[in-house]
Image (cartoon, grey):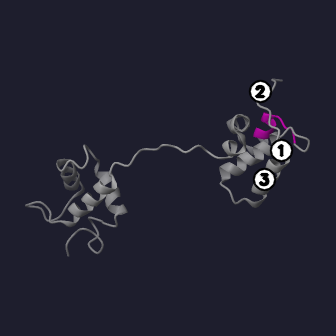
């Protein structure tokens, strides 16, 4: 059998904290799973000292066991339990762009049109250089976020 590179030895305080977390069930499911993994992998005096394959079978978590053990050794309990923040996609429209879109949607449509369409709003945002490019779906989502709808006359940008 392979020798473990990352050995988990929990101090009593962390062991108690993890025990409370697993009993109460108030944390995220992913964090509770990781707490169970650490408790089962603990090689301290009160630890269960189970091997990774056995923990993985019991908790139905394959790669998570080794990764959690590694994260605990590398960065302690908070690093093992919680995910690092993710950068994500920055929003296409700034708050200024959002306000500009809502103002355009509430204004009179261009000549020869009865109402604004998503395509017209998109083209207008690009023409005013609010954004370089934007999709119709992004415009729709931004309108929805602002409480506007092109199709619903009662709450939308359309005139009655």
- Cα distance between the residues tagged 1 and 3: 10 Å
**Residue pointed to by mark 2:** 5
Q: Classify mark 3: helix, strand or loop.
A: helix
Q: Which residue is drawn at the image coordinates 29% and 75% (left, top)?
A: 154
Q: Which percent across, then down, holds residue 30?
A: 66, 49
Is disc 1 placed on a helix, strand or loop?
Answer: loop
- Judged by depth in the image, the label closer to the viewer, 2 or 3, is 3
Of the two numbered discs 1 and 3 on the same chain, state the one appearing first in sequence.
1
Q: Looking at the picture, does residue 72 appear above or below residue 158?
A: above
* Distance from the alpha carbon under mark 1 to that under mark 2: 19 Å
**Residue, far top:** 2
123 or 14: which is nearer to us?
A: 14
Q: Residue furthest left?
A: 112
Q: Which residues are magenta?
A: 48-56
- Front residue of 67/79: it is 79
For mark 3, what is the residue?
A: 17
Counting from the top left corner in percent of width and height, residue 67 is at 69, 35
Tags 1 and 3 touching, CB below 8 Å: no
- Asked if residue 50 lies in the magenta stretch, the reply is yes
**Going from the N terminus, do you reach mark 1 or mark 2 first?**
2
153 and 70: which is toward the camera: 70
Image side of residue 93 versus residue 43, left or right = left
Mark 2 touching mark 3, by CB under 8 A? no
Q: Position of residue 127 (x, y in %)?
A: 17, 48
Residue at image mark 1: 11
Identified at 18% across, 53% down, the residue is 124
Q: Label 2 to label 3, Cα distance in Å?
A: 25 Å
Residue placed at 18% from the left, 65% from the top?
107
Q: Is residue 125 left or right of residue 143?
A: left
Q: Judge the density around disc 2: few (<14), some (14-19), many (≥20) Cα neighbours within 10 Å.
A: few
Q: Image quadrant for the N terminus?
A: top right
């Amino acid at each position: 059998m392979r020798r473990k590179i990352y050995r988990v030895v929990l101090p009593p305080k962390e062991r108690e904290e993890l025990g409370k977390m697993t009993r109460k069930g108030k944390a995220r499911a992913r964090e509770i799973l990781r707490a169970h993994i650490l408790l089962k992998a603990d090689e301290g005096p009160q630890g269960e000292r189970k091997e990774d394959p056995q923990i993985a079978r019991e908790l139905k978590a394959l790669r998570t066991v080794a990764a959690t053990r590694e994260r605990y050794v590398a960065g302690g309990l908070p690093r093992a339990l919680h995910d690092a923040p993710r950068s994500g996609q920055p929003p296409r429209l700034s708050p200024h762009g959002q306000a500009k879109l809502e103002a355009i949607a509430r204004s009179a449509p261009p000549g020869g049109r009865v109402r604004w369409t998503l395509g017209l709003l998109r083209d207008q945002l690009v023409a005013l250089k609010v954004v370089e490019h934007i999709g119709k779906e992004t415009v729709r989502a931004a309108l929805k976020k602002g409480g506007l709808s092109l199709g619903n006359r009662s709450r939308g940008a359309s005139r009655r």
